[in-house]
Amino acid sequence: YIKNMPLNIEILNSFANGEDAIAFLKNNHCDIIYTDICMEKVTGLELAKYVYENMKNTKVVIISGYDKFDYAKEAMKYNVQDYLLKPLMLNEIEENLSKIIQLLDNEKKVEELIPIVEKDLFSRISQGILSDEKEILHQLQLINVDIDIKNSAVCILELTYETNHFKDEWTYGKEQKYTAIRNIFKMNPFDIQYFWLNATENAMAFLCIKNHCNEMQVFKREIIQNLKEVKYDMDDIFH
């Protein structure tokens, strides 16, 4: 029935137990999971716990024949999207699925805006336009950024890159380009946060921040090491 719904969805797989589902999820991404609460080997709640800990953007819907508060409370702890009670009508499933698809679309739109919002905020901070400590903390909380503004090492990093690569090969838009590069930087072992400030045709600037760090020389060495690793992976971009 789900395959025939007028929705833009693809069913990736189905499993008889939660253990097989987790094994699949370790190597595959999915957006929505519908699971029975009672399964062999691994329960629906245990599956929800795995998703909560490892797949933060995936939505889980639990289907249960038990109208028990304890089950619902446990599901809420793992950020389960919905807790549906059997027996289910087919139109209930379609309505629920439509609602979650709309939620995912909205979250994607917000996620695409985050780099732009961050750029504006950190540009205003770095230029001294925004200097009130309480307001800075408030703005950081709004975009869910954790920075210890009183005990952090900070620097501005300018990168140059080969223009032809993005002119000839990159087709996803400039904001996505900056997001992609920033995401590569984020995968560093030093807990350094990178925030896009501005960009030109041949260069871009990032604000680099490391919480709970007072040793600028250590901070500098870590950034240089991170740059070397990024350059190794993207040698056709950086020079």
Image: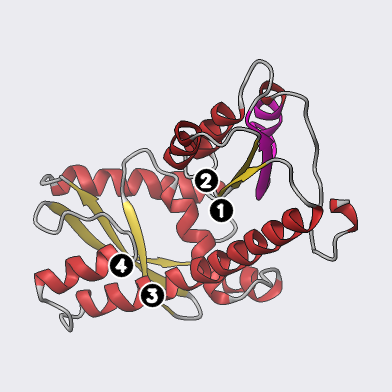
Q: Amino acid at mark 1?
A: Asp
Q: CA distance from mark 4 to mark 3?
A: 10 Å
What residue is at 65 percent from the left and 15 percent from the top? 41
- Indicate which label's residue lies in the foreground, 4 or 3: 4
Q: Is residue 64 visible?
A: yes
In-image side of 141 versus 21 (left or right): left
Find out whether the residues at labels 4 and 1 contact each other: C-beta distance under 8 Å. no
Badge 3: residue crowd in 10 Å (few <14, some 14–19, many ≥20): some
- Indicate which label's residue lies in the foreground, 3 or 1: 3
Check disc 3 and report the residue beneath it.
117
Residue placed most toward the observer, 33 or 96: 96
Disc 1, SS: loop
Q: CA distance from mark 3 to mark 1?
A: 29 Å
Query: Coloring scheme of the render?
Result: secondary structure
Disc 4, SS: helix
What residue is at 25 percent from the left and 71 percent from the top? 139
Check disc 1 and report the residue beneath it.
235
Check disc 2 and report the residue beneath it.
232
Q: Amino acid at mark 3?
A: Val
Check disc 4 and report the residue beneath it.
142
Between discs 4 and 1, the one toward the N terminus: 4
> Where 206 sits versus 87, above or below?
below
Was residue 34 drawn as part of the magenta stretch in this picture?
Answer: yes
In-image side of 239 versus 12 (left or right): left
Between discs 3 and 1, the one toward the N terminus: 3
> Where 144 sits versus 136, above or below?
above
> Where 74 sits versus 233, above or below?
above
Badge 1: residue crowd in 10 Å (few <14, some 14–19, many ≥20): few
Q: CA distance from mark 2 to mark 4?
A: 35 Å
Find out whether the residues at labels 1 and 2 contact each other: C-beta distance under 8 Å. yes
Find out whether the residues at labels 3 and 1 contact each other: C-beta distance under 8 Å. no
Badge 4: residue crowd in 10 Å (few <14, some 14–19, many ≥20): few
